[in-house]
Image (tube, rainbow, N blue to C red):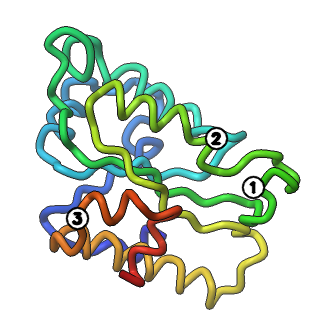
Amino acid sequence: MIRKIPNDPLVTFVDLYEKYPDFNVDVEKEKKLLEEHDIIVWHHPFYWYSAPPLLKQWIDMVLELGWAYGPGGTALSGKWIFNAITTGGTSEAYSRDGHNRFYLQEFLAMFNQTAHLCKMRYLPPFVLQGTHRLSDEDNVKGASAYGELIAGLIQGRWEFENLNSLKILNDALEL
């Protein structure tokens, strides 16, 4: 999906594993980066029903009490945030009757609550599912849709309420 992220000065893509292979997150640098952006994307594979370890550590360290939440913690207030994820399982696998027994959005509740605590505006996820079964063509289509979504967000194409009413942000491209 990252191949299709628009090359735009308003977009900053950070690969945490490339930037912090030793897991020593530069908290102040990351906070400054968050302050410079109005839309934040937690872009990651869906890893054991959650985030990969470094993203979880990043959340734990960067979203500090008194800065991101709690008394005086308003640095992220009003910013839009969402997950852009890939899953090995299909959308059918993420249902009551599916292999994973829960809907994907239920597994993402931790992210939603984190955003709420930080007074951010949490949007539905952008999802590419069943990735190990997708054809090259379907992978390209999914990546292109993601790039189009990011471009539309930069351009202010949608209102928050319109996006928030969707099940997944993939459907925004039909608005």
Disc 3 marks which amino acid? Glu
- At mark 3, the secondary structure is loop
- Residue 94's disc number: 1
Determine the residue positioned at 21% across, 12% down. Answer: 66
Count of residue discs: 3
Give the mark, 3 or 2, whose residue is nearer the N terminus.
2
Placement of 99 over or under 22, stated as above or below = below
Give the mark, 1 or 2, whose residue is nearer the N terminus.
1
Give the mark, 1 or 3, whose residue is nearer the N terminus.
1
As measured in the structure, the alpha-carbon distance from the residue carrying label 1 to the one carrying label 3 is: 28 Å
Determine the residue positioned at 53% across, 78% down. Answer: 142
Q: Pointer 1 and pointer 2: residues touching (CB < 8 Å)?
A: yes
Determine the residue positioned at 16% across, 24% down. Answer: 74
As measured in the structure, the alpha-carbon distance from the residue carrying label 3 to the one carrying label 2 is: 25 Å
Residue 101 locus on image (x, y percent): 82, 46
Disc 1 marks which amino acid? Tyr
Of tags 1 and 3, which is closer to the observer? Answer: 3
| Residue bearing mark 3 | 159
Q: Is residue 160 left or right of residue 37?
A: right
Determine the residue positioned at 69% across, 69% down. Answer: 131
Residue 19 locus on image (x, y percent): 37, 42
Between residue 157 and residue 34, name the one nearer to us. Answer: 157
| Residue bearing mark 2 | 107
Disc 2 marks which amino acid? Phe
As measured in the structure, the alpha-carbon distance from the residue carrying label 1 to the one carrying label 2 is: 9 Å
Quadrant hosting residue 50:
top right
> Badge 1: how crowded within 10 Å, few (<14), some, or many (20+)?
many
Between residue 121 and residue 126, name the one nearer to us. Answer: 121
Q: Is residue 62 left or right of residue 73?
A: right
Residue 91 locus on image (x, y percent): 72, 65
> Badge 2: how crowded within 10 Å, few (<14), some, or many (20+)?
some
Q: Is residue 91 left or right of residue 26?
A: right
